[in-house]
């Protein structure tokens, strides 16, 4: 049986969530794909970017 | 493993063809290096080091800078490969493998059993292999908390600005503030703003005030008061006055009224002969003398006339100025009452007297003129004083009000910007809240579903470990407003948390059951499980049951069980006789972990490799280690009589003791062999002292490559004494220490004399 990792878990979550800003999900998933990135900082920036719109 | 953790050189662990293995070793002998290597290879990190920020400790601490740290895994499938430090693999390279459950450590169990609720939760997700999802949840939670805090701070800032702008610290509304601003603008003749957003734009105030200033006129009173600033008391040039007076009182000037008579006389003299008599009075005169007198008088008159004209013009101008000055002051005096001012009467100028004197070529009254000017000066000063008193001091009221308007606009700007910032922060915080809450809810739902799925299996495994206890199911339930907790069906009742009814060893069993059930249910790629010291809380009986469980129910898996517990190791050896066994006997800084399996040939080959690559120091170290390994192997295989040592201290014997043990054995059982190899042994002892030991202990002497090469050759010669040249196995491969043979039987110990 398949057990999802963080990436798939997040993707499933975001797909199920309605009313998210356009492009939010794609950018969030991109963060998980990146290496050598300060993940909390990148996630925070994401929320701030979309909060500013 | 090479230069990895506590392994200085290279260490190979042979798992056979996917067979299970029980690894035994005291604490500190390096057996967990196996778990570290596999964790690093399959997940890209060693979690314990990662938590402590010591990922660099993946490298052997005593390694040279140039030494490459690596772990290589060999499999019969596609999972094998090599990872080199620093690990530059992309996460995707091990992403799928790292998601599977394969490693359970004793310290994770300890966290599950003993730590705080948060740490227990973390241990649970680690046991279940959900660390990555939990790690992202932690990041989300951290971000959510930060954004909440910032949103709150931004809102407080808004309220602070709002109170600052309101009357007496009271909060003011947008509507009230806009109305106030419009009113102030109306009073200042400035176009009022239509919205607060207009006020926020700094260019609005500049434009509005600029327009109002350009169109505004000073008031009548302001203009009237300005006139006083232009008052200048006139002054007449004293030299002109004095020159005039001197001229008009001179003899030459006395002739001026008779100028026409003198001119007529001159004309007569020029047209008629006078014959010694005056043509007018008939008296006897000298004609020539009379003519000279007439000519002289005429010249004087003309000069006086020119001088007179030179003075008359400035005098007339001065008189006019006096008249104008009087007229201006008289006007101010007349209008002053209408402006609410009271001025003294303006002194009248002696204008007619001056005119009369000038017309009559009479001297002017200089004293009277000076007195008048003095009076006029006094009037001017008095009038200026009155006007200054009536003028506003400093900037005008309008200026002051404009400054206040600008200050209010700035406050509005700060407030509105703070409001915009707070709105952004709130939106970000709300979005983070939504995502985090949904994430956490989904995580709980998924975990609950997952536990439901494996609950039966967990109960079964648990029952194998505790057959007399009735643990029917395991599930997850909400616990307080935020958290979740593990719950068990225990003797027919639901217990949450299980820590309330289960002892430490029972919790230990529950965690192992969860781990094994998870792996069984979800592992797709990894067919091995690694348990590193997981029975710390078990008594002897339960250790036996775990060994039995692993041997019976996980025979399809490749199990790697590391333990420092000798009884558990023996249990495993008995219950699973087909498993491989490996014992770690000791660890030292220079040699690293040492196992009960001798590896002389491998070490000597490594020494040879280093020598060929120019690493003389490394070759000497390896050669010494190879000799030590060989002598230990010989001593153990031939049961050399060595002094008794407590515990594992046999691994720490001095080289001299090992040489002595070999000599005593050969002297008793193979004297001929001893005699033949005695020169070799002596040379090797010398090599250890002169060539190999110096290198090991970092002395000042550095061996030459040739010296190490010779020493290595001697060690290989000694090694050859104990191997069959036909089958390459040791002479003690089978038989007893007293009568042993190699695998093919061609070589024996004690050596068979030639011809027998």
Image (cartoon, coloured by chain):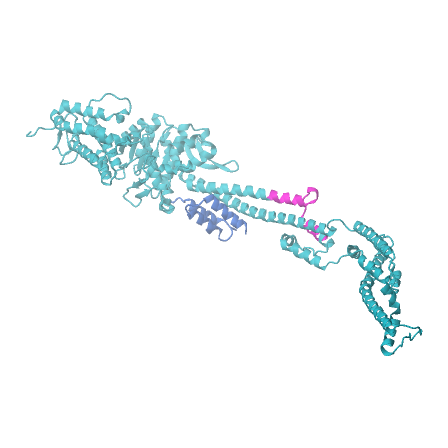
Chain colours: A blue, B cyan
Determine which quarter of the picture holds residue B288: bottom right
Residue B446 seen in the figure: no
The quarter of the picture where the N terminus of chain B appears is top left
Q: Is residue B1 above or below residue B312?
A: above
Q: Nearer the viewer, residue B312 or B453?
A: B312
Magenta stretch, main secondary structure class: helix
Give the residue displayed 87% in from the left and 70% down from the top.
Answer: B259
Q: Residue B366 at x, y = what percent? A: 85, 56
Name the residue located 35 percent from the left edge and 28 percent from the top edge: B542
Q: Is residue B393 left or right of residue B280?
A: left
Q: Position of residue B682 (x, y in %)?
A: 17, 27
In front of the other: B295 or B76: B295
Q: Is residue B199 visible?
A: yes
On-image quarter of the C terminus of chain B: top left
Residue B317: quarter of image: bottom right
Which residue is rendered at x = 13% and y = 36% of the image? B726
The residue closer to the viewer here, B111 or B382, is B382
- Relative placement, left or right, of B473 versus B229 is left
B510 or A46, which lies in front?
A46
Residue B366 located left or right of residue B403: right
**Relative vertical location of residue B530 with respect to residue B226 in this rendering, above or below:** above
Depicted B319 relative to depicted B150: above or below: below
Q: Is residue B569 magenta?
A: no
Toward which corner of the image does residue B564 lie, by quadrant?
Answer: top left
Q: Residue furthest top?
A: B644
Query: Is the residue B1 above or below the residue B363 in the image?
Result: above
- Find residue B610 and report its horizontal and vertical position in percent: 24, 38
**Residue A36: where, in percent of width, then height?**
42, 45
Which contiguous range is marked in magenta?
B155-183
């Amino acid at each position: 049986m398949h057990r999802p990792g963080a990436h798939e878990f997040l993707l499933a979550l975001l797909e199920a969530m309605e009313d998210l800003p356009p492009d939010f999900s794609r950018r969030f998933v991109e963060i998980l794909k990146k290496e050598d990135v300060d993940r909390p900082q990148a996630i925070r920036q994401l929320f701030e970017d979309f909060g500013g719109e | 493993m090479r230069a990895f953790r506590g392994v200085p050189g290279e260490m190979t662990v042979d798992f056979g063809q996917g067979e299970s293995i029980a690894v035994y070793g005291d604490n500190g002998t390096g057996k967990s290096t196996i778990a570290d290597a596999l964790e690093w290879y399959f997940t890209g990190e060693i979690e314990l080091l990662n938590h402590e920020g010591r990922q660099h400790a993946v490298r052997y601490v005593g390694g040279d800078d140039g030494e490459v740290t690596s772990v290589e895994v060999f499999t019969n499938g596609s999972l094998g490969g090599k990872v080199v430090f620093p690990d530059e693999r992309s996460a995707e390279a091990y992403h799928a493998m790292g998601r599977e459950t394969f490693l359970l450590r004793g310290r994770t169990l300890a966290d599950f059993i003993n730590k705080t609720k948060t740490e227990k939760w973390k241990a649970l997700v680690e046991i279940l292999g959900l660390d990555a999802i939990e790690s992202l949840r932690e990041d989300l939670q951290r971000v959510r908390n930060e954004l909440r805090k910032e949103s709150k701070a931004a809102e407080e800032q808004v309220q602070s600005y709002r109170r600052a702008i309101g009357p007496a610290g009271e909060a003011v509304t947008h509507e009230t503030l806009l109305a106030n601003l419009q009113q102030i603008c109306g009073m200042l003749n400035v176009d009022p703003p239509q919205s607060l957003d207009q006020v926020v734009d700094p260019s609005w105030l500049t434009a509005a005030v600029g327009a109002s200033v350009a169109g505004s006129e000073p008031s009548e009173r302001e203009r009237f008061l300005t006139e006083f600033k232009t008052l200048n008391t006139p002054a007449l040039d004293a030299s002109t006055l004095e020159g005039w007076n001197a001229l008009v009182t001179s003899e030459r000037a006395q002739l001026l009224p008779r100028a026409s008579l003198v001119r007529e006389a001159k004309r007569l003299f020029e047209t008629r002969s006078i014959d010694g008599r005056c043509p007018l009075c008939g008296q006897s005169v000298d004609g020539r003398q009379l003519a000279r007198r007439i000519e002289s008088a005429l010249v004087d008159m003309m000069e006086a006339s020119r001088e007179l004209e030179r003075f008359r013009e400035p005098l007339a101008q001065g008189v006019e100025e006096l008249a104008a000055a009087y007229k201006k002051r008289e006007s101010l005096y007349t209008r002053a009452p209408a402006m609410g001012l009271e001025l003294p009467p303006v002194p009248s100028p002696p204008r007619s007297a001056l005119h009369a004197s000038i017309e009559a070529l009479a001297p002017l009254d200089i004293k009277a003129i000076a007195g008048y000017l003095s009076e006029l000066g006094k009037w001017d000063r008095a009038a200026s004083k009155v006007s200054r008193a009536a003028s506003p001091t400093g900037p005008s009221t309008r200026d002051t009000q404009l400054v206040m308007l600008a200050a209010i606009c700035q406050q509005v700007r700060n407030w509105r910007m703070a409001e915009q910032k707070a709105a952004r922060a709130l939106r970000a915080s709300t979005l983070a809240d939504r995502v985090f809450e949904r994430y956490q809810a989904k995580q709980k739902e998924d975990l609950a579903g997952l536990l439901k799925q494996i609950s039966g299996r967990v109960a079964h495994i648990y029952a194998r470990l505790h057959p007399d206890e009735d643990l029917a199911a395991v599930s997850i339930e909400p616990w307080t407003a935020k958290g979740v907790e593990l719950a068990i069906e225990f003797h027919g009742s639901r217990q949450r948390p299980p820590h309330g009814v289960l002892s430490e060893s029972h919790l230990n069993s529950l965690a192992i059951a969860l781990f094994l059930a998870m792996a069984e249910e979800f592992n797709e790629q990894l067919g091995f499980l690694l348990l590193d010291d997981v029975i710390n809380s078990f008594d002897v009986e339960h250790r036996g049951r775990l060994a039995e469980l692993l041997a019976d129910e996980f025979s399809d898996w490749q199990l790697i069980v590391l333990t420092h517990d000798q009884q558990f190791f023996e249990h495993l050896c008995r219950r699973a006789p087909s498993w491989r066994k490996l014992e770690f006997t000791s660890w030292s800084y220079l040699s690293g972990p040492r196992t009960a399996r001798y590896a002389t040939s491998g070490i000597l080959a490594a020494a040879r490799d280093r020598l060929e690559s120019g690493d003389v120091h490394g070759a000497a170290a390896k050669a010494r280690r190879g000799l030590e390994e060989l002598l230990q192997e010989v001593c153990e295989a031939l049961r050399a009589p060595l002094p008794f040592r407590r515990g594992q201290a046999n691994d720490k014997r001095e080289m001299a003791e090992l040489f002595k043990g070999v000599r005593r054995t050969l002297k008793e059982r193979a004297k001929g062999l001893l005699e033949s190899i005695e020169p070799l042994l002596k040379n090797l002892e010398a090599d250890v002292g002169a060539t190999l030991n110096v290198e090991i202990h970092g002395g000042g002497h550095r061996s030459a490559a040739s010296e190490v090469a010779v020493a290595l050759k001697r060690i290989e010669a000694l090694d050859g004494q104990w191997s069959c040249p036909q089958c390459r196995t040791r002479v003690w491969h089978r038989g007893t220490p007293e009568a042993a043979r190699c695998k093919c039987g061609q070589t024996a110990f004690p050596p068979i004399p030639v011809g027998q």
